[in-house]
Image: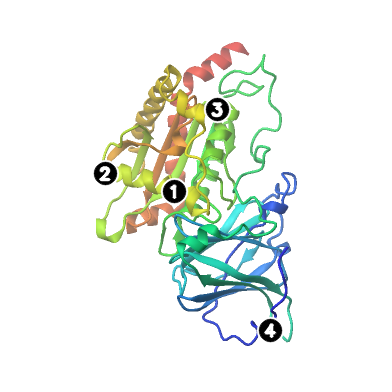
């Protein structure tokens, strides 16, 4: 457990500007405890009001102001050098842009949820460093409770040889072992289960809003990709559920980080008929401007350099959250070349064309609207899958659309029509069986 010694050092320190960040204590959360719903009052969680860095390239201190003490775990990682701090879920009331700059041994840091009930801070380091001290101070003398992390520079050899901290937690970010709350509670027995259909026979459509929690995705003009695509995904779910033709499942319906492999597992475990991942791209300023929606399917070779860039960026989601998980389960890697995967890719391409035809009548499309690349989130071998970049947050016109309810409604409507067209044959089969 963390130490509260060394309370001597903090209160006299004049540190930098205020800011704040999240953490998560995944080692203390059981599957049941982690199933906190979005309806839980935010006020029930500890509040972080400010965060600051002080020091230089030899010694650097991080301080987080809180309205109450919290438990935490911290560990260092190499390649690249990082420090990861996990805490219980925290309500962060921070200035936008907090963590985008660094000081001393810290290049930058990011924070957010990694699971319901747990938050995380990831520090990107300038080089190898050790955690020289870490502790929590209780509130005293009109000063808030504080979490303190002290880092010291070390060489690579010392970093590699340093023993693992005592009580080091298992820090792999993951959704609970049970399906998320949006997954149907009961599934039929094997004899009744049809591919892509639960007990009532309706096809299952999985909507995957990209990013979330500690992973903001692209950002522009105060808007984060994770929030824009979540709003779009919720609107699409509402439209599909209102029609009553499908069982609709979301990989996330709040601001929670979901690892890439866990997103595809939701679709595979439910034998989904379709998996639609929603994102919003951005181009670096040096690469000019681009606009419009783009639809991506899986391929071993990217269709162009931009598709490769985007796939590389999206495939780093797990690393952004602090940990590089396995690239793919072995069973998926082995099956990528079999007939099931080929057939699935054919269906994915068919849906991509249907979606393009519907969307181009209502929203602006990219000049090359159909592309492909090696997106990890599309690699379910037996579920037709597409990734839709609904626009560029780096483009002023697109961003205006992305925040518009009217535009969102039109785009969602065209996407729902494409889903209807794609699943029409399966729906006809279900209707004939009733």
Marks 1 and 2, how far apart at CA: 17 Å
Which of the two discs, 1 and 2, labels the residue nearer the N terminus?
A: 2
Question: Residue 216's spot in the image, x, y percent?
Answer: 49, 56
Residue 8 tag number:
4
- Alpha carbon of mark 2 to alpha carbon of mark 3: how far? 31 Å
Q: Is residue 96 left or right of residue 189?
A: left
Camera-side residue: 208 or 391? 208
The residue lying toward the viewer, choosing from 269 and 121, is 121
Determine the secondary structure under disc 1: loop
Whichever of callouts 2 and 3 sits on the residue coming sooner in the sequence is 3
Secondary structure type for disc 2: helix
Mark 2: few, some, or many residues within 10 Å (few <14, many ≥20)?
few
Residue contact at pointers 1 and 2, CB within 8 angstroms: no
Ranked by sequence position, the earlier of labels 3 and 1 is 3
Q: CA distance from mark 4 to mark 1?
A: 40 Å
Tag nearer the camera, 1 or 2 = 1
């Amino acid at each position: 457990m963390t130490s509260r010694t060394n309370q001597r050092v903090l209160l006299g320190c004049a540190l930098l500007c205020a800011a704040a960040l999240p953490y998560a204590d995944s080692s203390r959360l059981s599957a049941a405890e982690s199933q906190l719903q979005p309806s839980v009052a935010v006020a029930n969680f500890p509040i972080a009001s400010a965060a600051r860095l002080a020091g230089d390239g030899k010694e650097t201190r991080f301080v987080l102001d809180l309205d109450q003490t919290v438990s935490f775990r911290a560990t260092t990682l190499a390649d690249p050098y990082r420090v990861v701090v996990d805490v219980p879920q925290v309500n962060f009331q921070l200035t936008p842009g907090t963590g985008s700059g660094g000081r001393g041994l810290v290049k930058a840091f990011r924070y957010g949820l990694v699971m319901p009930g747990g938050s995380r801070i990831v520090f990107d380091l300038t080089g190898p460093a050790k955690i020289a001290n870490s502790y929590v101070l209780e509130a005293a003398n009109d000063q808030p409770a504080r979490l303190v992390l002290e880092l010291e520079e070390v060489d690579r050899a010392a970093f590699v040889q340093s023993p693992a901290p005592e009580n080091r937690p298992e820090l792999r970010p993951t959704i609970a072992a049970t399906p998320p709350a949006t997954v149907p509670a009961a599934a039929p027995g094997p004899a009744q289960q049809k591919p892509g259909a639960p007990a009532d026979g309706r096809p299952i459509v999985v909507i995957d809003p990209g990013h979330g929690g500690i992973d903001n995705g692209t950002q522009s003009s105060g808007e984060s990709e994770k929030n824009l695509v979540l709003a779009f995904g919720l609107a699409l779910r509402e439209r599909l559920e209102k029609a009553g033709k499908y069982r609709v499942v979301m990989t996330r319906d709040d601001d929670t980080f979901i690892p890439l492999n866990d997103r595809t597992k939701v679709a595979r475990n439910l034998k989904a008929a379709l998996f639609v991942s929603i994102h919003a791209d951005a181009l670096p300023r040096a690469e000019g401007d681009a606009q419009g929606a783009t639809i991506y399917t899986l391929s071993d070779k990217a269709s162009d350099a931009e598709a490769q860039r985007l796939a590389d960026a999206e495939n780093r989601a797990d690393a952004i959250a602090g940990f590089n998980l396995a690239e793919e389960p072995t069973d998926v890697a082995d099956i990528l070349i079999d007939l099931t995967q080929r057939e699935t890719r054919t269906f994915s391409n068919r849906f991509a064309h249907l979606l393009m035809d519907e969307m181009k009548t209502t929203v602006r499309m990219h000049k090359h609207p159909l592309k492909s690349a090696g997106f990890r989130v599309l690699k379910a071998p037996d579920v037709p899958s597409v990734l839709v970049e609904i626009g560029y947050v780096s483009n002023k016109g697109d961003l205006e659309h992305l925040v518009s309810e009217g535009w969102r409604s039109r785009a969602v409507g065209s996407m729902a029509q494409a889903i209807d067209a794609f699943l029409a044959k399966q729906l006809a089969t279900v209707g004939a069986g009733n």
